[in-house]
Amino acid sequence: MFQPLIIYSYCYYFVNPSSSTTALNQISYLDVSKPFNNANPPFEENSIWKFICTAFLSPQKNIIYLFGGIVRDVNTDIGSLKSVLYSYNLETNEWTIPTTNGIAPGKRREMNGIINNKTGKFYVFGGLSDQFTGTENIIALNDMNIFDTISLTWSKGSTIYAPLPRADYTATLLSNGIIVFIGGRETNYFVDVDINQTAQGVILENRNGHSAVLTPDERIIILVGVKI
């Protein structure tokens, strides 16, 4: 068994990849199985250059997977489109491109996925593809892709009554098996999703590029973000 870790991937969001924004190439982690100074936590780092992606930990293996995003060679800064999926072994500290079964989804960025720890299956919806991921035009996507971390097999989920093509949202898995998608930008015009359509209570500002966490009592807490 591996030690408990808080894992921060370097999947970094920005609006214009051709701008002066700097992409970070670290994966940082903090061992919380032993005491540490909160003012100076002892983070450790490993690196690969991949950003605007989503990360998930296999519940059966000591492996972190990175899905989607933009990949650049750390030495040449040249874009690399070798794979939509990378894996990082927590025991050997090595990066690899896993050999998978089924038809892997097309390369994309600015999406969010969840892992079902009971089944070992990863679910990721939508995102967008553009010249940085291998398509000539910017295309918003609304397909549901499923990756079984046990058999390393890709499959497709249903798109019946699926949301409009969407990117920069949050995805949260509830205990009843329902995935809740909040906010983001939708359609090829990338307008903000109305997050108050079905919810009651306080009116929230529409947003994208935000974060969401699930509390033990099944409340979703939405954090920061930006708006168009």
Image: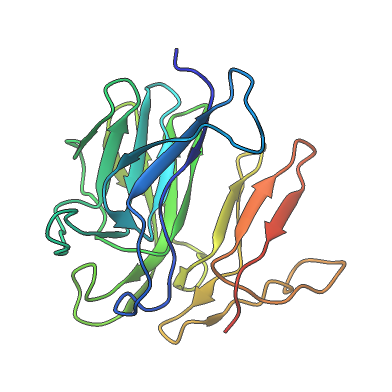
Compared to residue 204, the image places residue 71 above or below, namely: above
Q: Residue at x 32, y 52 (%)?
A: 25
Left or right of 101: which side holds 109? right
Q: Residue at x 50, y 64 (%)?
A: 162
Coloration mode? rainbow
Residue toward you, 54 or 159? 54
Expressed as whole percent of the image width and height from the top left, the position of residue 97 reads 19, 40
Q: Name which quarter of the figure residue 32 lies in.
A: top right
Expressed as whole percent of the image width and height from the top left, the position of residue 72 reads 20, 59
The C terminus, quarter of image: bottom right
Left or right of 80: which side holds 12? right
- Residue 70 visible (yes or no): yes
Q: How many marks?
A: 0
Left or right of 174: which side holds 17? left
Residue toward you, 89 or 157? 89
Q: Residue at x 16, y 55 (%)?
A: 73
Compared to residue 115, the image places residue 1 above or below, namely: above
Expressed as whole percent of the image width and height from the top left, the position of residue 94 reads 23, 30
Q: Residue at x 55, y 70 (%)?
A: 184
Q: Name which quarter of the figure residue 87 lies in.
A: top left
- Residue 68 visible (yes or no): no
Compared to residue 101, the image places residue 157 above or below, namely: below
Residue toward you, 71 or 140? 71
